[in-house]
Image: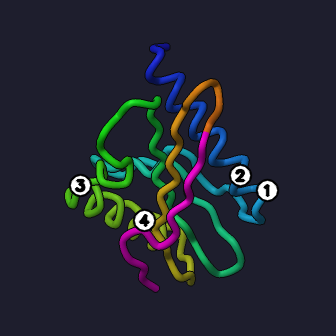
Amino acid sequence: MSKAYDFGKKAEDLAAAYLIKSGYSLLERNYRYLKAEVDLIVQKEDLLVAVEVKARSDGFMVALHESITPKKIKLLVSAIDHYVQTSALDVSVRFDIITFIYKNGNWHKNHIENAFYSFG
């Protein structure tokens, strides 16, 4: 595997562990639908959360959450809509972003809840 893949997988592992510790159940990891991929799908009670995980090493100028384009948001919404429909779930849906900056050997996390919009 590539160094970039390993870096991203480590960030997803950290995000999943953080969410589980925060009381969420991990339902899916890297859920794919058409051209979309949702990094993590978690649930807490009747709330389903689609989580986009972004990670960078120190030195990048663009804020991580700004790297999620309107096209990416549309794909994420489509994928979660498909997931909810095919799973016959009666839940509210929220879209979160968890960002990690790796600096000086440490991972710095930022959890942005309700990053774009919710439905359900």
Residue at the spot of label 1: 21
Question: Label 3's element?
Answer: loop
- Region of the chain picked out in magenta, as a range: 108-120
Which label's residue is closer to the chain start, 4 or 3? Answer: 3
Give the amino acid type for the residue marked by disc 2 in the picture: Tyr
Give the amino acid type for the residue marked by disc 3 in the picture: Thr
* Vertical side of 56 occupied by 80: above or below: below
Residue 69 numbered tag: 3
Which label's residue is closer to the chain start, 1 or 3? Answer: 1
Q: How crowded is the residue under tag 2: few (<14 C-alpha within 10 Å), some, or many (20+)?
A: some
In contact (CB < 8 Å): disc 4 and disc 1: no
Predominant SS of the magenta segment: loop
Question: Label 1's element?
Answer: helix
Q: Where residue 66 appears, x then y in whole percent?
A: 30, 54
In contact (CB < 8 Å): disc 1 and disc 2: yes
Identify the residue shown where x is 50% and y is 64%.
112
Task: Tell me the CA gap for discs 4 and 1.
Answer: 23 Å
Residue 18 numbered tag: 2
Question: Label 2's element?
Answer: helix
Give the amino acid type for the residue marked by disc 4 in the picture: Ile
* Vertical side of 111 occupied by 113: above or below: below
Taking depth in this image into account, of 117 and 86 the one nearest to the observer is 117
Task: Tell me the CA gap for discs 1 and 3.
Answer: 29 Å
Identify the residue shown where x is 44% and y is 34%.
56
